[in-house]
């Protein structure tokens, strides 16, 4: 799958309009889709149009106030990630903690209990193992960058953070931040993830049971390819309008 994705990505890079207004639309539309997926997977789903409206500053009566804050703070994290990548900074546990603080407005701390994650029928590692496992994860991720394709690398860091479950109930959100960072760092498009909350939980549960994350990786790859198809269609439409 990654070869097909890479070919389509290269085609898009050659077709992409070099215009500020297009870059602004591309980034905003990517963030809309990403946040729609994040809200869905964390169990607080919104309609995609609601996400767009909130980020545009509109007030909707049927959306809880905490959702407004979450979406706007997440957008600030997105911008912070962009700034970090301009300085060639790779993700670290400390940087992930900083993003946690921005999103949840409290100091990041690893869990101090041993919960059961019922959605995945899963018992995470003992809480005393969490700091060591997080450090090991990021060291392994750094070593694998030269030998592993970016799609697999992004899927792996997301699933491994879910496996460690460092932030308790906030882990799904922070694993999403790590996935977002990995995609942006590798130059892959940010996309709406094509899975329902139930499908996502099934993919995670399958990985935790078998150690095989192929189902999630395939979903992620299909979602990125779909996003590239949309972007290429927009590019073709733009070219046709110029010709007229």
Image (cartoon, rainbow, N blue to C red):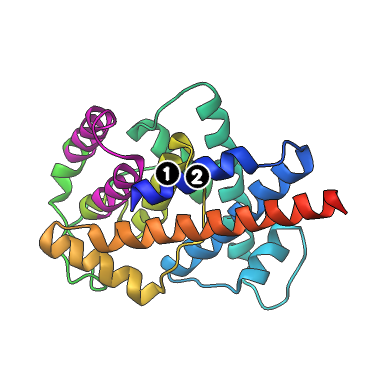
Name the image quarter holding residue 198: bottom left
Task: Estimate the spatial distance between the alpha carbons at disc 2 and disc 1, rounded to whole Å.
Answer: 5 Å
The x and y percentages for residue 126 are: 12, 51
The residue positioned 60% from the left and 38% from the top of the image is 14
Q: Residues within 10 Å of mark 2 (few under 14, many from 20)?
A: many
Q: Are marks 2 and 1 in contact (CB under 8 Å)?
A: yes
Q: Residues within 10 Å of mark 1 (few under 14, many from 20)?
A: some
The x and y percentages for residue 174 are: 40, 50
* Residue closer to the observer: 202 or 71: 202
SS assignment at label 1? helix
Q: In this view, does 214 lie to the left or right of 237?
A: left
The residue positioned 37% from the left and 31% from the top of the image is 94
* Residue closer to the observer: 58 or 147: 147
Residue 141 sits above or below residue 11 on the image:
above
Start and end of the magenta stretch?
133-162
* Residue closer to the observer: 201 or 29: 29
The residue positioned 44% from the left and 40% from the top of the image is 181
Q: In this view, does 110 lie to the left or right of 224?
A: left
Q: Does the magenta stretch include residue 163?
A: no
Return the mark for residue 6.
Answer: 1
The x and y percentages for residue 22 are: 74, 45
Return the mark for residue 9.
Answer: 2
Residue 116 visible, this orientation: no
The residue positioned 17% from the left and 49% from the top of the image is 127
């Amino acid at each position: 799958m990654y070869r097909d994705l890479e070919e389509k990505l290269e085609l898009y890079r050659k077709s992409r309009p070099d215009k500020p207004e297009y870059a602004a639309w591309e980034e905003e539309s990517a963030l809309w889709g990403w946040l729609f997926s994040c809200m869905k997977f964390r169990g607080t789903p919104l309609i995609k149009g609601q996400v767009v409206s909130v980020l545009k500053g509109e007030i909707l009566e049927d959306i809880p106030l905490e959702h407004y804050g979450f979406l706007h703070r997440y957008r600030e994290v997105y911008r912070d990630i962009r700034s970090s990548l301009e300085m060639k900074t790779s993700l670290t546990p400390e940087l992930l903690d900083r993003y946690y603080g921005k999103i949840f407005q409290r100091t990041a701390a690893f869990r101090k209990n041993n919960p059961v994650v019922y959605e995945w029928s899963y018992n995470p590692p003992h809480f005393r193992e969490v700091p060591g496992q997080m450090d090991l994860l990021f060291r392994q991720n750094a070593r694998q960058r030269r030998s592993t394709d970016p799609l697999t690398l992004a899927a792996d860091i997301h699933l491994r953070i879910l496996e460690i479950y460092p932030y308790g109930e906030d882990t799904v959100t922070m694993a999403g931040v790590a996935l977002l960072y990995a995609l942006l760092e590798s130059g892959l498009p940010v996309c709406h993830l094509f899975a329902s909350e139930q499908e996502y939980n099934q993919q995670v549960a399958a990985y935790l049971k078998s150690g095989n994350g192929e189902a999630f990786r395939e979903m992620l790859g299909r979602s990125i390819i779909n996003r590239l198809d949309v972007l290429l269609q927009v590019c073709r439409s733009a070219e046709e309008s110029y010709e007229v």
